[in-house]
Amino acid sequence: METTKPTLGDTALEAWRNWRALPWQNLPCFGQALGVGEFCWQANQAKPAGQELHRVINELATRPATESEEDEVWDCMLNGALRIYTRRNGIGIPKTPVTILHEMTGNRMESGLTG
């Protein structure tokens, strides 16, 4: 029996946009990019989508992702190496995912970009 892994889209672009647009899921939503780190989206009205990718530093702090980090996270999305999940956040609270929204598969996704 083959089990389907959760996904936020059929293409990398669709999954990326859906991750960015996720409302608060009663818990914060994060993405673990294999070999890169943990990231989340934060509101920033100066950005066209109204959101900015942030690198998680610790339980209490994030910083805007560099362009290079954002490119690496996108590459992880394309290559099936990005897990998106909700988890509790706070000092002394385990960082174990509560709900997996998009699972790492190791399989390359279609980009969804045209041209």
Image: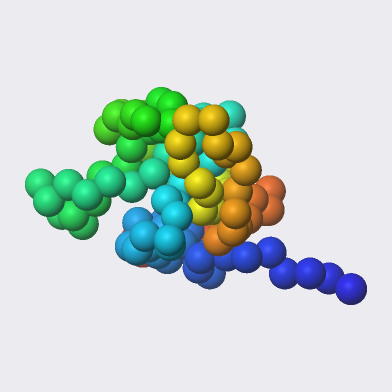
Q: Residue at x 58, y 29 (%)?
A: 35
Q: Position of residue 34 (x, y in %)?
A: 59, 36
Q: Position of residue 100 (x, y in %)?
A: 60, 57
Q: Position of residue 17 (x, y in %)?
A: 36, 61
Q: Residue at x 64, y 50 (%)?
A: 104
In this image, 114 relative to 89: left or right?
A: left
Q: Quadrant of residue 52?
A: top left
- Screen quadrant of the C terminus: bottom left
Q: Quadrant of residue 60?
A: top left
Q: Residue at x 34, y 29 (%)?
A: 61
Q: Position of residue 47 (x, y in %)?
A: 15, 48
Q: Is residue 94 above or below residue 50?
A: above
Examine the rendering and report whether any part of residue 55 can be seen. Answer: yes
Task: Work out whether residue 11 or residue 60 is closer to the camera in this orientation and state it.
Answer: 60
In this image, 44 relative to 10: left or right?
A: left
In this image, 21 relative to 27: left or right?
A: left
Q: How is the image coloured?
A: rainbow
Residue projecting furthest to the top: 57
Q: Residue at x 34, y 63 (%)?
A: 23
Task: Work out whether residue 94 or residue 86 is closer to the camera in this orientation and state it.
Answer: 94
Task: Work out whether residue 34 or residue 30 is closer to the camera in this orientation and state it.
Answer: 30
Q: Quadrant of residue 81?
A: top right
- Screen quadrant of the N terminus: bottom right
Q: Is residue 68 above or below residue 102?
A: above
